[in-house]
Image (cartoon, grey):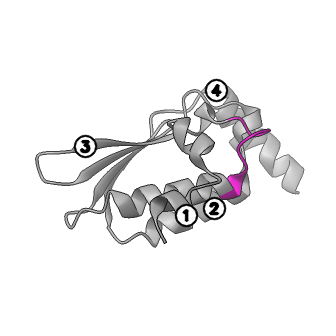
Amino acid sequence: MTINGALSDDFETLETGFFQFLGTDDHGRSILYHEKPKTDPTIHHRDSLRRVLFHMLHATHSPNGCVLIVNLRTMSMKHIDRLYAKKGFEGIMEAPMAVKALFMPSPTTSWLLHQTVFLPVLLA
């Protein structure tokens, strides 16, 4: 199977740029950037996002591992998808290269409120 065949239904998701390869650092590690708010949950299904994530991780394989930057600063309530977060994280951990560093810029106040106040109340 080719990348074109595997991602034939996911080109629109890929073109959003929510997951990007930024090159390599001085140690030969791939630098990957993830920004889920670039996607529209009403158009880009979580399965499509996960397939793009999977193929990008495999296409940018580095024997030295990777550095993953996850931008949460522009997230809003419409971008919160617990199943995507869980399955996406599992996919990253099962990738053929080790994540050597993970950077997550501080999330916004609304994200923190959701995680610490609203979510525990909803799940209780």
Q: Which residue is mark 4?
A: 109
Q: Which residue is mark 2?
A: 86
Q: Is residue 111 left or right of residue 101?
A: right
Secondary structure category for the residue under label 4: helix
Q: Which residue is mark 3?
A: 23
Residue 8 higher or lower than 20, as above or below: below
Task: In this rendered view, identify the residue nearer to me: 85 or 38.
Answer: 38
Amino acid residing under circle 1: Ala
User: At 80% across and 50% down in the image, what residue appears?
Assistant: 120
Give the foreground label among 4 and 3: 3
Position in image of residue 42 (x %, y %): 80, 38
Amino acid residing under circle 4: Thr
Give the foreground label among 1 and 3: 1
Magenta-highlighted residues: 40-47
Residue 14 higher or lower than 9, as above or below: above
Residue neighbourhood size for the residue with mark 2, other residues' Cα within 10 Å, grouped as few (<14), some (14–19), many (≥20): few
Q: Is residue 122 magenta?
A: no
User: At 41% across and 59% down in the image, what residue appears?
Assistant: 57
Task: In this rendered view, identify the residue nearer to me: 18 or 108.
Answer: 18
Residue neighbourhood size for the residue with mark 4, other residues' Cα within 10 Å, grouped as few (<14), some (14–19), many (≥20): few
User: At 70% across and 30% down in the image, what residue appears?
Assistant: 76
Q: Badges 2 and 1: C-beta atoms under 8 Å apart?
A: no
Query: Which numbered disc flags the more N-terminal residue, 1 or 4?
Result: 1
Give the foreground label among 1 and 4: 1
- Mark 2 and mark 1: span between their CA atoms? 22 Å
Give the foreground label among 2 and 4: 2
- Mark 3 and mark 2: span between their CA atoms? 26 Å
Amino acid residing under circle 3: Gly
Q: Dividing the picture into quarters, in which one does residue 6 lie?
A: bottom right
Q: Badges 2 and 4: C-beta atoms under 8 Å apart?
A: no
Residue 57 higher or lower than 104, as above or below: below
Q: Which residue is mark 1?
A: 6
